[in-house]
């Protein structure tokens, strides 16, 4: 059994608890990678350097607002050229936004 002190969850872990924490960590990392990619898209569409785009993008905490802004920037820059792609992308992203905040720390 592993022992861990992670945000108040201290003590020995069962194998199942350890697997849960690893899965949770991977989910958080994957979502962070997705957000970083979305920030890169924001930088491209807004014509700003990455560090400037990150300053703005990561201040937008509402994921629906982020998608709406990306959608508007996509329309302004490319018109309808990439509309089918972007529609399919947002269709996949919306459910992820709903479950993002459900990745909490389980209580022991």
Image (cartoon, rainbow, N blue to C red):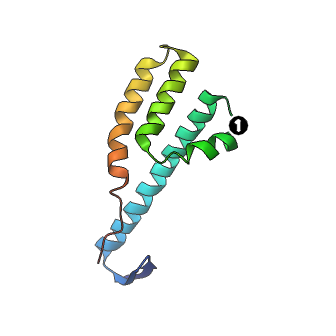
Q: Position of residue 15 (x, y in %)?
A: 31, 74
Q: Residue at x 39, y 32 (%)?
A: 90
Residue under the image location 32 percent in, 73 percent down: 17
Instruction: Please identify the residue farthest to the bottom as the structure is shown.
Output: 11
Extreme residue in the top direction: 80
The quarter holding residue 24 reads: bottom left
- Residues 20 and 1: in front is 20
Q: Which residue sits at x=36%, y=72%?
A: 18
Q: Quadrant of residue 96?
A: top left
Q: With 16 as the anchor, is 2 left or right in this view? A: right
Coordinates of residue 21 in the picture (x, y in percent): 38, 68
Q: Tell me if residue 13 comes above or below residue 79 in the rendering.
A: below
Numbered marks: total? 1
How packed is label 1: few (under 14 Cα within 10 Å), some, or many (20 or more)?
Answer: few
Q: Is residue 53 left or right of residue 92?
A: right
In this image, 102 relative to 86: left or right?
left
Q: Position of residue 62 (x, y in %)?
A: 44, 45
Q: In this image, 69 relative to 2: left or right?
A: right
Snapshot quadrant of residue 47: top right
- Measuring 45% from the left and 35% from the top, which residue is drawn there? 67
Which structural element holds mark 1?
A: loop
Pick the front one: 60 or 21: 60
- 103 and 66: which one is in front? 66
Q: Quadrant of the N terminus?
A: bottom left
- Residue occupied by mark 1: 49
Q: Give the answer, above or below, for where 6 lies relative to 36.
A: below
Indicate the quadrant containing the C terminus: top left, top right, bottom left or bottom right.
bottom left
Residue 40 versus residue 9 in the image, above or below? above
């Amino acid at each position: 059994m592993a022992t861990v002190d992670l945000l108040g969850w201290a003590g020995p872990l069962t194998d199942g608890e350890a697997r849960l924490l690893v899965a949770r960590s991977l989910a958080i990392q994957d979502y962070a990678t997705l957000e970083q990619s979305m920030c890169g898209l924001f930088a491209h569409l807004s014509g700003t350097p990455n560090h400037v785009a990150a300053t703005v993008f990561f201040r937008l905490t509402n994921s629906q607002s982020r998608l709406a802004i990306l959608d508007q920037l996509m329309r302004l820059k490319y018109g309808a050229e990439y509309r089918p792609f972007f529609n399919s992308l947002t269709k996949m992203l919306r459910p992820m936004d709903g479950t993002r905040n459900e990745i909490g720390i389980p209580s022991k």
